[in-house]
Amino acid sequence: MVKCALVSGAGMGIMHGRNFNNHPDAQVVAVCDMVPDLLAKAKEEFKVPGYPSIDELLANCDAELVLLITNETRRIPPLRQIIAAGRNVFTEKPLCGLEGQHRVKESDAEIAAPAIKEWRKSGVKFGIDYNYRFFRHFKMLHDDAVSGKLGQIQFVRARAHFACWSHIIDQILWTMGLPEWVSVLGDPNKPGGWHRLIHMKWANGVDGELTGADSWGWDDGPICIMIVGDKCYAEAKGLEGSYRRHKSYSAELEERWVVEEGRQEYGESFARMADAVIKAMIANEPFPADGEAAWNELLFEAAVHRSARLGGERVYLADVEKDVMK
Ligand SMILES: NC(=O)c1ccc[n+]([C@@H]2O[C@H](COP(=O)([O-])OP(=O)(O)OC[C@H]3O[C@@H](n4cnc5c(N)ncnc54)[C@H](O)[C@@H]3O)[C@@H](O)[C@H]2O)c1
């Protein structure tokens, strides 16, 4: 039985806590929240001891996995605390964003860098909730691209409403790896989720484009990725879920999958992630999306921010990494 401690009595925290607690091989054994009402709510939900600080939680409970479901404005200090205590940790995305998840900046990568360095040395497991990896349609796209079914990949086209922003970046990086450079139009000085028109290139010659905005993107599914290869091209779309694959140069449909009536991949993906995390704990394997994936999203976002700030200049991710990891 994997003993879990939950930090957060707020909505997302309770949702994750339930998914882990309902798992046959896991149990929430303690909870923590600095807000008394939310701590009381979490204690009542899981019928376990509760603590108002992470220090007290760590001192009083032997949970081997801490579910740190705070948000990106206050994730890094508790994350470092948990890693320093030698506990495995699972958290939400993005790793850091002091102005919120729709305005991640290069300075956020600087803040997160020490946590990544400490985690790499620590030997603890660190997971991040890129739960869209457990949408069946995104998994189909990933598998078809990495297995070679699409042939030689030529380019990637993607778009997302900012509600899905971390996830679309993770999807692209999960399948394609980090691009070599980005060039971005958009004005980071605008308030809110400033729109981003991103061009990118991978070292193997693949081109990519990704558009993100707050003002647009819900009309036809808030997330969509197409990968075009020289044999086939394929598209995964939406929170409910659909997938299609066509022959390149002819548009002939090879495969079409639509989620069953009454089901939704988004809703089901959190429990699938919890299941995969617990299985990884038991098998002593890395988590399905780990600290490297968390770091890659942040590094990409930092490069996007720098390029937009510089009026669309080509920014190499390796240069940004050298600067923020120093
Ligand atoms: N994966 C997805 O699809 C998905 C969907 C929705 C939200 N999210 C993410 O989930 C996260 C949700 O965060 P939130 O807004 O609920 O978090 P939050 O920061 O409001 O914190 C949640 C709770 O944790 C407590 N807390 C925070 N720091 C603490 C500390 N150091 N010690 C003790 N208690 C502490 C707070 O009092 C609060 O009650 C966001 O990062 C969001 O991006 C992900």
Image: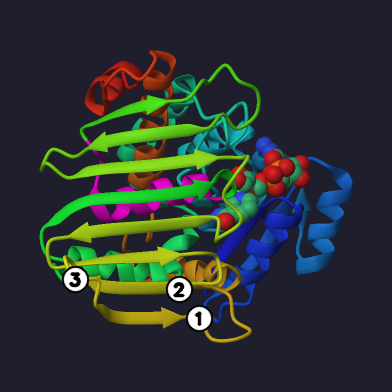
Q: Residue at x 59, y 45 (%)?
A: 216
Whether residue 130 is visible to the viewer of this picture, yes or no, is yes
Residue 4, image x, y percentages = 58, 62
Quarter of the image that includes the C terminus: top left
Residue 163 position in % (x across, y down):
59, 48
Disc nearer the start of the sequence (3/2): 2
Residue linked to disc 3: 250
Q: Amino acid at mark 3?
A: Ser
Is 154 covered by the magenta stretch?
A: no
Point out the tag, 2 or 1, that comes first from the N-terminus: 2
Residue at the spot of label 1: 259
| Residue that extends furthest to the right in the rendered view of this protein | 37
Tell me the residue at 36%/47% (across/down): 293
Q: Which residue is mark 2?
A: 242
The residue shown at (57%, 16%) is 189
Give the mark nearest the N terminus, 3 or 1.
3
194 left or right, relative to 29: left
User: What secondary structure prevails in the magenta region?
Assistant: helix
State how far apart marks 2 and 1 are (Cα): 6 Å
The image quarter containing residue 307 is top left
| Amino acid bearing label 1 | Val
Residues at marks 3 and 1 touching, judged by CB atoms closer than 8 Å: no
Question: Within the displayed image, which quadrant is ligand 1 positioned in?
Answer: top right
Instruction: Compute the Cα span from label 3 to label 2.
Output: 21 Å
Q: Position of residue 89 (x, y in %)?
A: 49, 51
